Image (cartoon, helix red, strand yellow):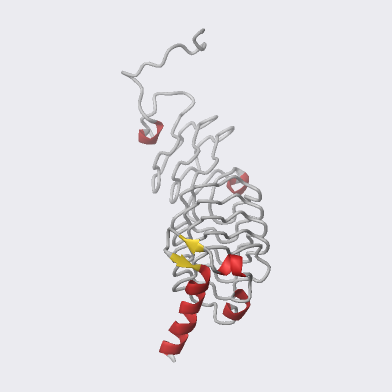
Amino acid sequence: MSMPKSGALNLREWTAPETCGATSSATNPVDARGADWSGQDLGELDLRNAKLCRCDLRGTNLSQCQLEGADLRLARYDQTTLVPEGFALNTSGAVGPGAKLNGAFLNSTDLRGMDLRGSMLMGAYLSGSDLSGALLDGVSLAGADLRSATFRGAMCRGTRFGTCEMDMADLRGANLEGAALETVTSIRGADFSLCTGLEDQIGALLSRSVQELDCWNPMTRSTTRASLESLIKGQGQGA
């Protein structure tokens, strides 16, 4: 088998992309996949055609950087991330507030504590993703695949779940005030224990099929029915 044009990988000199510092990369273009550059000022760093997928850019100042051709898929940003004027961070494939991610493949992605307000996630593939503590207020998840996704303690006020699939989803402790769940395709095995804001929807959710309500979730060790009924008991105790 012939070797690639780049030659054999020199393991003595190779370093994992995740350890790449904002100014220490010896490669051109820069390979910083999965690196943590959060809260840093990158100055005039040349990031043309850089591999920045999965890079943490929350609070990072890239306003003077050259970002032409950079791969930002699944990079994380927030409202304090600065980019050059005219650079469309929200359509780059990066994840953060206002990101346009309709139909994006985000399976098993670590999105804990992410601010996703204003983002578009219709039809997104989020199965197995961890959104614990994420801010999803007002976000549309219509048609999204949320099977086995984790929303523990997430803020989902006014979130539109539309026709998404929520089989085995873990929503324990999530704030679902004003969330639209009436047209969800399936809640089979989903756990709603300790959720808030569901008072007006518990009856409708408990009227769904036996197959959905009595499905055992081996991760949370509960059925969907038991998790919903526990909310009713909680209301009675708090009265």
Residue lying farthest bottom? 239
Quarter containing the C terminus: bottom left
Is residue 219 placed above or below 65 in the rendered structure?
below
Location of residue 205 with respect to 110 vertically, above or below: below
Give x and y (percent) for residue 222: 45, 67
Q: Residue at x 39, y 24 (%)?
A: 26
- Horizontal arrangement in the rendering, residue 208 relative to residue 40 (left or right): right
Q: Nearer the viewer, residue 55 or 84?
A: 55
Residue, x 39% and y 45% (percent of image)?
Answer: 40
> Along the line of sight, which residue is nearer the eye, 192 or 132?
192
User: At which x and y percent is residue 173?
Assistant: 44, 70
Q: Is residue 207 left or right of residue 46?
A: right
Seen as rendered, the residue at the extreme left is 12
Rendered image quadrant of residue 185: bottom right
Q: Residue at x 44, y 45 (%)?
A: 56
Q: Tell me if 186 is positioned left or right of 156 in this view.
A: right
Depth check: give the residue in front, 83 or 216: 216
The spot of residue 201 in percent (x, y) is: 60, 78
Could you tell me residue 170's position as x and y percent? 48, 62
Marker count (numbered)? 0
Q: Residue furthest top?
A: 2
